[in-house]
């Protein structure tokens, strides 16, 4: 997760990285969000190349309200090669196998590659959220 933060377009992570190191940012997100989901860790997936080198990961989860794609990321050296589509498909496949009525996911408007991946996968935009900081 720490390596995925290198060059991230996620606004929350970028803001956090102005205050903390990538290691601290990853640890905080893990402990304060991902580790708290009640869904099984067996759902979490790491994508690898045929030789075993990691490419990225997806964390399908349930946040207590909805099944979600909680986190998805590709290592910087593997970005732009379509791996995000495979990761999203795997997370979606796993959640759909739980016979859920819908799967939610979110991304920042500024994260155009992730928004495009969601669109390619058939995700519909249901709402927009504006967060203001000062």
Image (spheres, grey):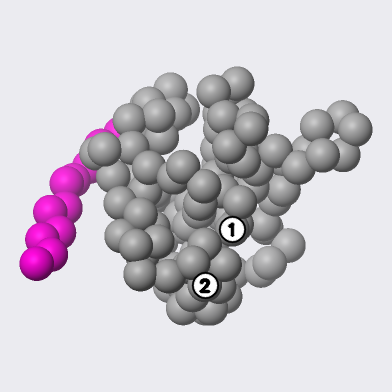
How far across and how far down the image is residue 111, in percent?
Answer: 33, 37
Could you tell whether 36 is left or right of 129 in the image? right
- Whether 58 is among the magenta residues is no
Q: Nearer the viewer, residue 121 or 27?
A: 27
Q: Measuring from the top left, give residue 90's x and y in whole percent.
A: 64, 39
Front in this rendered view, residue 67 or 32: 32
* Residue 125 within the magenta-colored segment of the rendering: yes
> What residue sits right under mark 2 in the picture?
24
Query: Residue at position x 51%, y 51% from top?
Result: 5
Is label 1 in a helix, a strand or a loop? loop
Kindly indicate whether the residue at mark 2 contacts the one at mark 1 (C-beta within 8 angstroms): no
Q: Nearer the viewer, residue 57 or 1?
A: 1
**Mark 1, residue position:** 2
- Characterize the local packing of mark 1: few (<14), some (14-19) or many (20 or more) Cα atoms within 10 angstroms: few
Tell me if residue 96 can be seen: no
| Residue at 73% over, 62% down | 42
Q: Is residue 121 above or below residue 98?
A: above
Q: Residue at x 43, y 70 (%)?
A: 20
The residues colored magenta run 124-134
Count of residue discs: 2
Residue nearest the viewer, comparing 38 with 51: 51
| Mark 2 surroundings within 10 Å by alpha-carbon count, few (fewer than 14), some (14 through 19), many (20 or more) | some
């Amino acid at each position: 997760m720490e390596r995925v933060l290198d060059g991230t377009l996620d606004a929350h992570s970028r803001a956090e990285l102005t205050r903390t190191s990538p290691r601290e940012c990853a640890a905080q997100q893990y402990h304060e969000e991902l580790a708290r989901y009640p869904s099984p860790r067996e759902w979490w997936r790491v994508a690898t190349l045929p030789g075993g080198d990691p490419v990225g990961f997806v964390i399908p989860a349930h946040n207590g309200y909805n099944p979600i794609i909680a986190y998805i990321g590709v290592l910087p050296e593997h970005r732009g090669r379509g791996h995000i589509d495979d990761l999203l498909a795997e997370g979606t496949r796993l959640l759909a196998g739980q016979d859920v009525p819908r799967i939610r996911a979110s991304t920042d408007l500024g994260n155009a590659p992730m928004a495009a991946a969601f669109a390619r996968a058939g995700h519909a935009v249901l709402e927009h959220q504006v967060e203001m900081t000062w």
